[in-house]
């Protein structure tokens, strides 16, 4: 059977399973969403956010791209961030990478990958900034450590956005988290949490003034 046909059949089975457990499930699902979490993760098909966190539809607002990057010129990401933070009022923003990330691996090579090279350039910058440490490791450990450093860099990129800083000023939220998922053991490891109104390098800090 074609994979897409199997997906349609699975959808029907999923509906019946949900209704058996909770007859009002779809009535509630049709109500306005109120997620507390924005998830910025990798597009890798092996890292589904709801599956690995045991959450239900409506609990996580999701944005995914190759290697879970937060790029200050990416209007797609910034639009998602602004909507989640200022309109949905999420309390937490999570950047979640994963060990063995293909995008991170590719960034350590000189392969010509077309348009993808322009995207991976952002990870190359992370590598350049930490080359002295990373070059001490074996190839496998280098990739895994760069995955971690990349997550930490994207957390800081979030902190440097006016979207996050304005939310911190107005409502002392959201918290920003950096996580890494291990596909070999299924464990999510927390690398960092940045609390609202944490210190920001003056170069990236915006000033906001209360109206009136």
Image: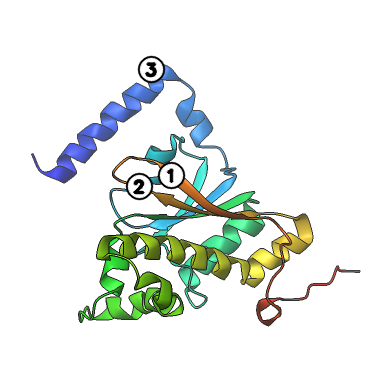
Q: CA distance from mark 1 to mark 3?
A: 31 Å
Please say if the residues under marks 3 and 2 sit with CB atoms less than 8 Å apart. no
Q: Which mark is residue 20?
A: 3
Looking at the picture, does residue 137 appear above or below residue 179?
A: below
- Indicate the quadrant containing the N terminus: top left, top right, bottom left or bottom right: top left
Q: Say which label, 3 or 2, has the lower sequence index.
A: 3
Looking at the picture, does residue 11 appear above or below residue 203?
A: above
Left or right: 138 in relation to 188: left
Q: Nearer the viewer, mark 3 or mark 2?
A: 2
Q: Which mark is residue 133?
A: none
User: Can you tell which quarter of the image residue 135 is in?
Assistant: bottom left
Left or right: 34 in relation to 55: right
The residue furthest right is 212
Please say if the residues under marks 2 and 1 sit with CB atoms less than 8 Å apart. yes
Residue with the mark numbered 1: 188
Mark 3 lies on a secondary structure that is helix
Q: Kindly identify the residue that appears in the image at 17 percent across and 37 percent down.
A: 6
User: Can you tell which quarter of the image residue 87 is in?
Assistant: bottom right
The residue furthest left is 1
């Amino acid at each position: 059977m074609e994979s897409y046909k199997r997906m349609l059949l699975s959808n029907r089975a999923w509906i019946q399973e949900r209704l058996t457990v909770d007859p009002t499930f779809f009535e509630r699902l049709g109500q306005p969403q109120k997620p507390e979490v924005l998830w910025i993760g990798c597009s890798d098909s092996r890292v589904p956010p709801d599956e690995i966190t045991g959450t239900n539809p409506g609990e996580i607002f999701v944005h995914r791209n190759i290697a879970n990057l937060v790029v200050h010129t990416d209007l797609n990401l910034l639009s998602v961030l602004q909507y989640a933070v200022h309109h949905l009022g999420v309390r937490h923003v999570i950047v979640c990478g994963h060990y063995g990330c293909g995008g991170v691996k590719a960034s350590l090579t000189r392969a010509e990958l077309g348009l993808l090279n322009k995207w991976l350039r952002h990870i190359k910058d992370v590598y350049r900034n930490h080359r002295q440490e990373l070059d001490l490791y074996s190839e496998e450990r280098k990739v895994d450590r760069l995955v971690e450093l990349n997550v930490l860099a994207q957390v800081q990129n979030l902190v440097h956005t006016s979207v996050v800083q304005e939310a911190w000023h107005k409502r002392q939220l959201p918290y920003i988290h950096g996580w890494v998922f291990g596909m070999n053991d299924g464990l999510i490891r927390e690398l960092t949490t940045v609390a609202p109104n944490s210190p920001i390098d003056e170069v990236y800090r915006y000033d906001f003034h209360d109206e009136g």
